[in-house]
């Protein structure tokens, strides 16, 4: 697990460091690159950041797909549980109706 994934996993809803789409990012606070950095170093840093963004985007998409799959599986399991409960209720009614006859 890399540092970014570790940071993402350990943030909480109330964490002030948590990224929020609606709040602009203050580059002077978040930048790890100094003002005396050369252009090639900046390009390298940008490439690294773009790579991290790509990885996080793929991870987010993968997680979204997993959520969709699990949601569908959950719906199917709930349908099966409902059908099983209905079947058990009908069997119980039939059983007690037939036991009373004997």
Image (cartoon, rainbow, N blue to C red):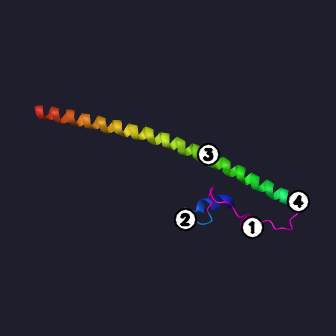
Q: Which mark is residue 39?
A: 4
Element at label 1: helix
Disc 2 versus disc 3: distance between alpha carbons? 25 Å
Q: Which residue is mark 3?
A: 62
Task: Decide if residue 39 is on the left or right side of residue 92.
Answer: right
Residue 96 position by quadrant: top left
Which mark is nearer the camera, 3 or 1? 1
Q: Residue at x 35, y 39 (%)?
A: 82
Span shown in magenta:
18-41
In terms of sequence position, does the residue under pointer 4 or pointer 3 come before the other? 4
- Write down the quadrant of residue 92 in the picture: top left
Q: CA distance from mark 3 to mark 1?
A: 32 Å
Q: Is residue 3 placed above or below 91 in the rendered structure?
A: below
- Where is residue 17? Give x, y as percent: 63, 65
Residues under numbered marks 4 and 3 in contact, where contact means CB atoms less than 8 Å apart:
no
Distance from disc 4 to disc 1, alpha carbons, whole Å, reads 18 Å
> Disc 4 vs disc 1: which is toward the camera?
1
**Is the residue marked by circle 1 packed among few (<14), some (14-19), or many (20+) residues within 10 Å?**
few
Residue bearing mark 1? 28
Quick one: label 4 or label 1, which is nearer the N terminus? 1
Q: Secondary structure at mark 3?
A: helix
The answer to whether any part of residue 61 appears in the image is yes
Q: Which residue is mark 2?
A: 14
């Amino acid at each position: 697990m890399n540092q970014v994934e570790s940071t993402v996993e350990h943030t909480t809803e109330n964490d002030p460091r948590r990224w929020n789409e609606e709040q602009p990012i203050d580059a002077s606070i978040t930048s790890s690159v100094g003002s005396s950095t050369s252009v090639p170093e900046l390009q390298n840093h940008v490439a690294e950041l773009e790579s991290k963004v790509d990885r996080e985007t793929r991870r987010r998409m993968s997680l979204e797909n997993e959520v969709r799959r699990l949601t569908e599986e959950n719906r199917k399991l709930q349908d099966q549980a409902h059908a099983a409960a209905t079947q058990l209720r009908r069997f119980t009614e039939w059983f007690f109706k037939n036991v009373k006859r004997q």
